[in-house]
Amino acid sequence: MKDFREVKAGTKRFKKDYVAIMLWFVGRAIQAAAAMDEAVRKEFEELPDRFTFSLSVMPDGPHMIVGKSKRGIVYYLGWDPEGKDITLTMKIKNIEAAMLLFTFQESIAVAVARDRLIVDGEVPYACAVVRILDIVEVYLLPKIIARLAVKRYPVEHPGRKFSRRVLIYLRALLGF
Amino acid sequence: MFLPERYEFYCPVKINSGNRALDHLPFELDTLNAKKPFVITGKNSVERGLVDIIIDAFKDSGLTIGIFDGTPSSPDLKLIRELFHTYRDRGYDAIIALGGGPVTDTAKVLNIAVSGEPEDLEQCAGDGLIKKPLKPFFFIPTLSGSGYETSRYAFFEGRAYASRFLMPDIAVIDPRMTVAEDAKTTAVISLAALTHAAEAYVSTGRSPLTDSYAYPAIQFVMENLLNVIKNPQDKKGGLALANAHCLAGCAFSNIEAGIAHKLGKVIGDAGHIPHGICMGILLPHVLETQLSEDNYHISDLLLPLAGFDKYAETGADLRGERAIGILYNFQRDLFAAGGGAIARTLRDAEVPKEILQDLAKKAFGYGSGCVDMEGYLKILEQAWEGR
């Protein structure tokens, strides 16, 4: 037929790789922050034992899975949701929405408000995860960017925060 | 808030609007269990790079899309037959109309055919003759079209189709697609939307829900049309106008067509002037004739037209006249901003005065609640002369 063509959707390799790296790093930073930051620790304490959540990009990843053990220790559980008993699934609807989130043009709270995510699980758990991500982003990003990425920038002693930030970065990179 | 003794309202259209809204298309298709969409558009969308944006939105979705970009300004049944075979043979399961006017009409009519058989097209022409839901149908506005895109209407080769099943399932309004093409094209669809929304807002069939669609549609057009005509790159304004077009179509689907709409359609179909421009010319004249009638709520129109402050500072008995005055001024401003391309009167639009009688007769033939043929003629004569 004239003026007709069929197009197979390509990929956005670079964006997908970038988001995968960000999810990997944020997942490990959550593990580190849960051990070092009082607010993150408290949020996880309120969540049930063996609570596991995933943050993924639709339709087929990348994924980030974080869980809490029976003893209350928080672990980054990798990028493969296969075979894991996930309590809460947060899915970003597409890679461009994930880019807005991970280039810090939109905070996670704004992304939720703008319907860029779908949540499968209990809403109070999802709210706790959003608060945890907010705190972790404050550690990972310079103040000027973090202000855009989080709902409310916390007031804390700059020296204490700096030392904790360095440690969280180190632990996230080294994975302990 | 006006609450009628009885009303019905139906609107299945989900509106997905805003920054990078198009990237949600694969997700939205999935919610309707559609895996292989067929995009219908025109050459103009290819030239403006809009088709490339759609293709980009599908990247990473794993989907295959069909694109037909040759919709002419007057599509015919031969085209529908070709599209029907392509759709069926290649296993498509949803239709996306990129752009308005003939593109959306083609997509709606194709949807009737592929949801049943091509022969259905003849049997389904008329009001309420489509009896079952059609295939998933998406509409992506581009600031050009007719203003009927989200409505329950489709017009094709002289046939009019009206059914709630013709309303799109989802309208995706993305600021990358709603950059104005030229002043006149933008004005045609925006004035049609303003007229549909205003007639819904003042009509005897209005309800709290038609109000909630019509109110922002009127405000968006009044606040943004002039700016977009002066600065076509105004993305925020373009997005607001595209929202107005979609909202007005939904409101219009839930009321009986008004007089400005009917007359505008008759003149537009006669080929003298685009129907949207015509409706914009006629609207204040029609409202003026309805001002004295209790059934119409002309004075309420001042609120979306002028805002809370002006509404509050105007006495209840003067609000109707002031609303009409604002519409006349708006016509004049549009005429100036468009460099004369957006006519203020039927005379500006070079509609011959001799044919007004015939036009009135045709419009009267469509039926109307309270205006006789003389009434139609009077409105047309006033709109020809101008105020």
Image (cartoon, coloured by chain):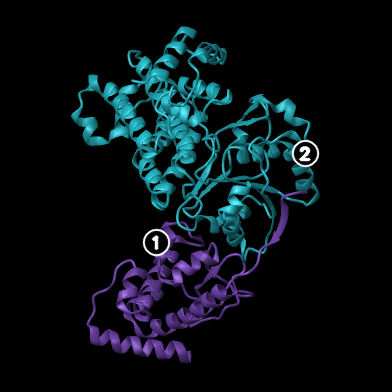
Chain colours: A purple, B cyan
Left or right side of A1 for B31: left
Q: Nearer the viewer, residue B332 or B320?
A: B332
Q: Nearer the viewer, residue A137 or B125?
A: B125
Query: On the rendered image, what quadrant is the N terminus of chain B found in?
Result: top left
Neighbourhood count class around disc 1 (C-alpha, 10 Å): few under 14, some 14–19, many 20 upward: some
- Please tell me whether mark 2 or mark 1 is closer to you in this view: 2
Q: Nearer the viewer, residue B119 or B366?
A: B366
Q: Which residue is mark 1?
A: A110
On screen, B303 above or below A79? above
On screen, A10 above or below B123? below
Q: Nearer the viewer, residue B341 or B88?
A: B341
Q: Quadrant of residue A81?
A: bottom right
The three-letter amino acid code for the residue at tag 2 is: Arg
Left or right side of B159 for A17: left
Number of callouts in the render? 2
Disc 2 element: helix
Please name the residue shown 62% across and 35% down the image.
B165
Neighbourhood count class around disc 2 (C-alpha, 10 Å): few under 14, some 14–19, many 20 upward: some
Q: Which residue is mark 2?
A: B81
Q: Position of residue A68 (x, y in %)?
A: 48, 78
Q: Position of residue B186 (x, y in %)?
A: 46, 41
Residue B182 visible in the snapshot: yes
